[in-house]
Image: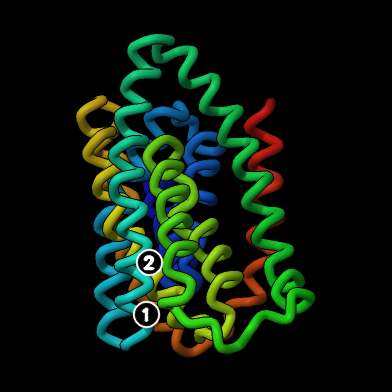
Amino acid sequence: MDPHFSIAGFVVGVLVGMSGVGSSSLMLPILVLFLGVSPLVAVGTDLAYSVPTKIVGAFMHSRQKTGSKKVVLYLALGGVPAAILGVLTLRWVESHIGLAALNADLKHGLGVLLFVVAVVVLITPYIIKKGDPDPYITVERAKWRIILVGAVVGYLVAITSIGAGSITMTALCLILPMMRIQDLVGSDVAFAALIVPVAAVGHVALGTVNWPMTIALLVGSIPGVLLGTWLCKKLPTMWLRPAMAVAMIAAGTRLFA
């Protein structure tokens, strides 16, 4: 068992539990760029290790009452069907263009997505300030926007494994600015725990999951997410945005090499 995978799992697990962001947007570049894993196998393995990690994180957030069941429900209404559609899309693409071409296209697509996510993560606090959001916006009033976010994220997660944390968290900050950041993080992690298994099953069927690598990642990620979830209740998370955005931009640049 390569300890490098377990160390990566621990670091990313802490970020997931603490901020709801980082699972795939950081793990995927680590696997592809630094640990030499092919993009398609990296996506499948990332999703497989994320299943227990997200479930443990969701359980811990539920225990400490950080999250909103209604937000999770609306995200899932859009996200679960979209994740299934994403898996079917991936199977169609694989059968028509082949694994080699799919890996190359996926690598470049991931690079673009990382740039987009990095920009969104960075500018969210400024958009919220300048927009002067209505403090009385409720979850019920934002229902259809939340469902749409769930659908977009579910589709992206099935194809790239990126988006369950970074895009969902950013969108929720914009749609529900009156909610506590801890409740947004808890909702984000719980939603990911629902859609990631759907996407992971599709990749298991495709044969793109490396199981020894998955176990090595879990050895680090489970303790990491437990620590991160505890820290979520104790520490502010806004300071993570600049550091994560820089890491995503650097990784996105490398994916075009």
**Residue under label 2:** 189
Relative to 101, is 215 on the left or the right? Answer: left
Residue 2 location (% of width, % of height): 36, 43
What residue do we see at 29% from left, 45% from top? 81
What residue do we see at 31% from left, 57% from top? 77
What residue do we see at 49% from left, 30% from top? 36
Circles 2 and 1: CB atoms closer than 8 Å: yes
Residue 222 location (% of width, % of height): 30, 64
Residue 105 found in image quarter: top right
Relative to 83, is 245 on the left or the right? Answer: right
Please state the total of marks drawn on the protein image: 2
- Taking depth in this image into account, of 103 and 225 the one nearest to the observer is 103
In three-dimensional space, the C-alpha distance between marks 2 and 1, rounded to whole angstroms, equals: 9 Å
- Taking depth in this image into account, of 24 and 219 the one nearest to the observer is 24
Amino acid type at circle 2 is Val
Color style of the picture: rainbow
**Residue under label 1:** 67
- Taking depth in this image into account, of 16 and 32 the one nearest to the observer is 16
